[in-house]
Image (tube, grey):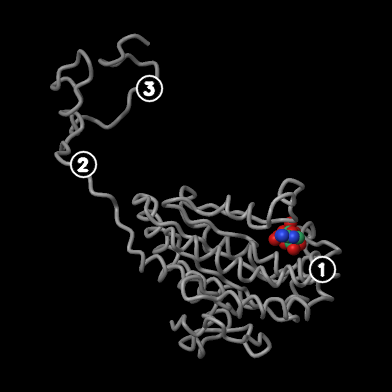
Amino acid sequence: MNIERFRVEPSASVDLAEIPTLWRPSSLDDLADEDARRQLRKRVAKRTNELDSLQERLHAEGRHRVLVVLQAIDTGGKDGTIRNVFGPLDAQGVRVASFKVPTEPERAHDYLWRVHAQAPGSGEITVFNRSHYEDVLVVRVHELVEERRWKRRYRHIRDFERLLCDEGTTIVKFFLHISADEQARRLQDRLDSPDKRWKFALGDLEERKRWNDYRAAFEDMLRETSTRRAPWYVVPADDKAARDLIVSEVLVRTLRRLNPQFPEPEDALPTTIDAATPIDGTADAQIPQPSSPLIAPSRNEPTRSNPVP
Ligand code: ADP
């Protein structure tokens, strides 16, 4: 898969109306919709399997830090992406940080304060579900600060991300790109499904009215802040399986490049545990050997090393 086609070149102008919201690998062109979807899900599963083993090594090695930023218009699929791409990974070493309306203490600080505190540590992959980019998106669209102020933030953000990169963090950013029609379908689905209605907020309709303002804000964000070391990918996201495939493919390639390795074992490790650690008062020969039946004594049953129940 050519993932470069989804990457935004630094300083490139982006016209989201020109970028498709629906994409399928051309190899699936001849398949019926259901079959194509099944194939896509299989491919996603393959990627998440590989991601899982890369992440295991990344965590064991404890050297690299990986920051994944997810931004989208409402209903764009951030939660689904997190569930499908990161859900299958080991919870140890992957963390999701969600950014909501800033709390009182957060508002009392500069806008990057709460963000920096959530940046990944060594061996960790952190997913930002919304991020510091809200401070040039919702803040701009709702005029929460004056224009002069949010405009300066592009520079702050570039510098902030550069700082993270210089200090050893790898950053990859995804904008999940859906069409206005697809948003209408998803909002309608939320209204219609009892298990999704809780997600529906009247505010979502107000936000939808500002579709064009958000679009302009996303376009400027992409142009101003896609850099060589912290690139944005615009992911066609109307089709959820295709979206997951693109995101997982970019991540696999990013982690492969880091090439994490299990740490070297200590020198002179013993080959068997029993011989190396005779338990107090127990001769080696008395410790059951692997050929003994592998049935553990019940909790209260006396054993040689624990004679009294
Ligand atoms: P989500 O939509 O991500 O599932 P919520 O429904 O809780 O989660 O929405 C979080 C809200 O917080 C969004 O409306 C978002 O615009 C808002 N938000 C996030 N960061 C900021 C910020 N810095 N300033 C103002 N609002 C923010």
**Residue identified by numbered label 2:** 266
Query: Who is closer to the viewer here, 27 or 21?
Result: 21
Q: Distance between the residues labelled 2 and 1?
A: 57 Å
**Residue identified by numbered label 1:** 142
Q: Which amino acid does label 1 sit on?
A: His
Q: How crowded is mark 2: few (under 14 residues within 10 Å), some or many (20 or more)?
A: few
* Label 2–label 1 contact, CB within 8 A: no
Q: Residues within 10 Å of mark 1 (few under 14, many from 20)?
A: few
Query: Who is closer to the viewer here, 257 or 277?
Result: 257
Q: Is mark 3 on a helix, strand or loop?
A: loop
Can I make out residue 196 in this image? no
**Image coordinates for residue 56, horizontal then vertical, percent:** 38, 53
Q: Is mark 2 on a helix, strand or loop?
A: loop
The image quadrant that residue 139 belongs to is bottom right
The first of marks 1 and 3 along the sequence is 1
Query: Who is closer to the viewer here, 111 or 1?
Result: 111
* Label 1–label 3 contact, CB within 8 A: no
**Image coordinates for residue 65, horizontal then vertical, percent:** 44, 57
Q: Which residue is at 64% across, 83% downward? A: 21
Position of 197 with respect to 266 (left or right) is: right
The first of marks 2 and 1 along the sequence is 1
**Residue identified by numbered label 3:** 298
* Ligand 1 location (quadrant): bottom right
Q: Is mark 1 on a helix, strand or loop?
A: loop
Task: Say if 102 sits above or below 26 in the image.
Answer: above
Mark 3 beta carbon near ligand 1 (under 8 Å): no
Can I make out residue 117 in this image? yes
The image quadrant that residue 205 belongs to is bottom right
Mark 1 beta carbon near ligand 1 (under 8 Å): yes
Q: What residue type is labelled 2?
A: Glu
